[in-house]
Amino acid sequence: MFVCICNAITERQIQDSVAAGASSMNDLQAQLGVGTCCGCCKDLASSYLSGNNAQGQNMVTAGINVQG
């Protein structure tokens, strides 16, 4: 699923960055460019840092409930 539409960043790319050591939103912005345009994805992207988006959970992005 795309998390950052502006920069075409997927949840998998964010998960991979976190697994490789990204520990802050600044890290994700530097590595991927997520959240550097309109900013609508920042909350969702940062939730991957705290582990709140484990596979199988429901999430809401852009007001749409997405079954994970």
Image (cartoon, grey):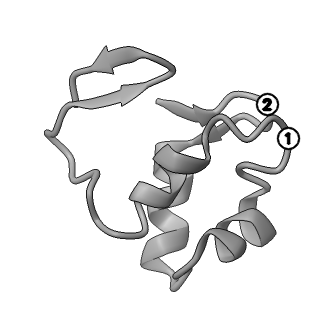
Residue extending furthest toward the right: 37
Q: Quadrant of residue 15?
A: bottom left
Question: Mark 2 and mark 1 in contact (Cβ < 8 Å)?
Answer: yes
Compared to residue 14, the image places residue 8 above or below, namely above
Q: Position of residue 56 (x, y in %)?
A: 14, 39
Of the two numbered discs 1 and 2 on the same chain, state the one appearing first in sequence.
Answer: 2
Which residue: 72% across, 34% down?
A: 8
Q: Is residue 29 left or right of residue 16?
A: right
Q: Is residue 3 left or right of residue 54?
A: right
Compared to residue 64, the image places residue 47 above or below, namely below
Q: Quadrant of the C terminus?
A: top left
**Mark 1 to mark 2 CA distance (whole Å):** 7 Å
**On the image, numbered disc 2 is attached to which residue?**
6
Q: Secondary structure at mark 2?
A: loop
Q: Secondary structure at mark 1?
A: loop
Q: Position of residue 13 (x, y in %)?
A: 56, 54
Compared to residue 23, the image places residue 10 above or below, namely above
Q: Is residue 24 left or right of residue 59?
A: right
Q: Number of labelled discs?
A: 2
**On the image, numbered disc 1 is attached to which residue?**
37
